[in-house]
């Protein structure tokens, strides 16, 4: 029987992504614009940002961006809507 080993933070896993042409071009553009060492670095940075945004959304926060004219605009992402709905549903269940 094959023994399962415990994964550590320093261990790496390989993933294969299916990206559309536009998404792949965007990944390459971001790599170049940010001078990232690799596409993987771009993906890791994006995941870290998304993780932080989801965690803050779970605590009732929202993601906004300051536009170049100084105005604020809330960023809408489907995944964050799911988190907000789940949070709202859990609050309703607790209040009942």
Image (tube, rainbow, N blue to C red):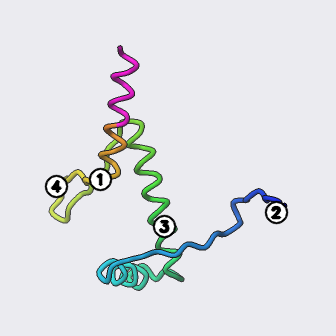
Q: Tag on residue 78?
A: 1
Q: Earlier in the sequence, mark 3 or mark 4?
A: 3
For numbered disc 2, what is the local secondary structure? Answer: loop
Q: Earlier in the sequence, mark 3 or mark 2?
A: 2
Residue 9 within the segment the image draws in magenta: no
Residue at the spot 83% in from the left edge and 60% down from the top edge: 3
Residue at the spot 41% in from the left edge and 39% down from the top edge: 58
Residue tagged by mark 2?
2
Q: Tag on residue 71?
A: 4
Q: Are marks 1 and 4 in contact (CB under 8 Å)?
A: no
Q: Are marks 3 and 4 in contact (CB under 8 Å)?
A: no
Residue at the spot 45% in from the left edge and 45% down from the top edge: 55
Q: Mark 3, residues whose alpha carbon is within 10 Å: few (<14), some, or many (≥20)?
A: few
Q: Residue furthest top?
A: 96
Which mark is in front, 1 or 3? 1
What are the residue bounds of the magenta stretch? Answer: 86-96
Magenta highlight: main SS:
helix
For numbered disc 4, what is the local secondary structure? Answer: loop
């Amino acid at each position: 029987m094959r023994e399962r080993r415990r994964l550590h933070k320093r261990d790496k896993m390989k993933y294969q992504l299916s990206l559309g042409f536009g998404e792949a071009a965007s990944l390459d553009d971001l790599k170049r614009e940010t001078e990232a060492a690799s596409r993987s670095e771009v993906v890791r940075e994006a995941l870290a940002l998304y993780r932080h945004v989801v965690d803050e959304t779970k605590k009732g926060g929202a993601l906004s961006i300051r536009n170049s004219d100084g105005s604020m605009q809330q960023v809408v992402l489907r995944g964050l809507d799911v988190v907000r709905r789940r949070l709202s549903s859990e609050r309703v269940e607790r209040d009942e």
